[in-house]
Every structure is written in structure tokens, then in C-alpha cells.
Image (cartoon, rainbow, N blue to C red):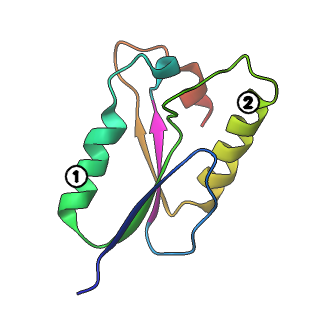
Amino acid sequence: MFIYNDVRYAFTKLWTGNHKIFLAGTIDMGSSVDWQQNLMEYFKNKGGRWLLYNPRQEHWNGSKSGEMDYQVNWELSHLEESDFIIMNILGTSKSPISLLE
């Protein structure tokens, strides 16, 4: 069986494969637990054809001109493109953006 696994972060192009999943939820400007990484490991071990859209960026700079607009538009586009949305709001977070997703 052919298995194709891929993860796309903000600043990557759309892919037209099966099972597109958006990882929505707590990031807290990068200071929260990286639950997305745990989920990526889960799907890696599960097998199958899937593509994860992960909005967490390793080097986020919200003060950079145009960065916030790009991030928000990337997320909205990929939320619409997704077949499934996994929402994970950690109890210790305020996650105001996640609530809008």
C-alpha cells in the first residue's frame, strides 16, 4: 500500500491529496506545548494518505510588516480547503484566535 504523509506550514502551497486536516487551536505565540508535533507523530504512525496544515511557525514575528495579514489569510484559506479540522484548546490558554477559527 502506498503511504503519503506530508505536513504544510504557513508559507507553503496547497496540495491536492486526500484527507487534508487543519490543526487549529492553542499556539499562544509559540509559548504553549507543541501539541501539533504530537499529532503529527500520531498520523505518521497511523499510515494512510493525509496532509496536515499546521499554522504554528518556528520563527514567528508578528511585528514584521504584512506577517499577520499573511498568516490570517493562510489560515482562512487552509481552513476552507481542509476536509477535517482538529480543534485543540488547552485549558491554560486564552486562545482568542482559535475561538474565531
Residue corresponding to mark 2: 67
Characterize the magenta stretch by its predominant secondary structure: strand
**Label 1 neighbour load within 10 Å: few <14, some 14-19, many 20+:** few
Amino acid under disc 1 = Tyr
Amino acid under disc 2 = Glu
Magenta-drawn segment: 20-25
Residue 64 x, y percent position in the rendering = 75, 22
The answer to which image quadrant residue 65 occupies is top right
- Please state if 2 lies on the left or on the right of 6 as rendered: left
Of marks 2 and 1, which one's residue comes earlier in the chain? 1
Of the pair 59 and 9, the residue shown nearer to us = 59
Residue 63 x, y percent position in the rendering = 73, 16
Furthest toward the right, the residue is 65
- Please state if 67 lies on the left or on the right of 15 as rendered: right
Quarter of the picture holding the C terminus:
top right
Magenta run includes residue 71? no
Q: Which mark is residue 93?
A: none
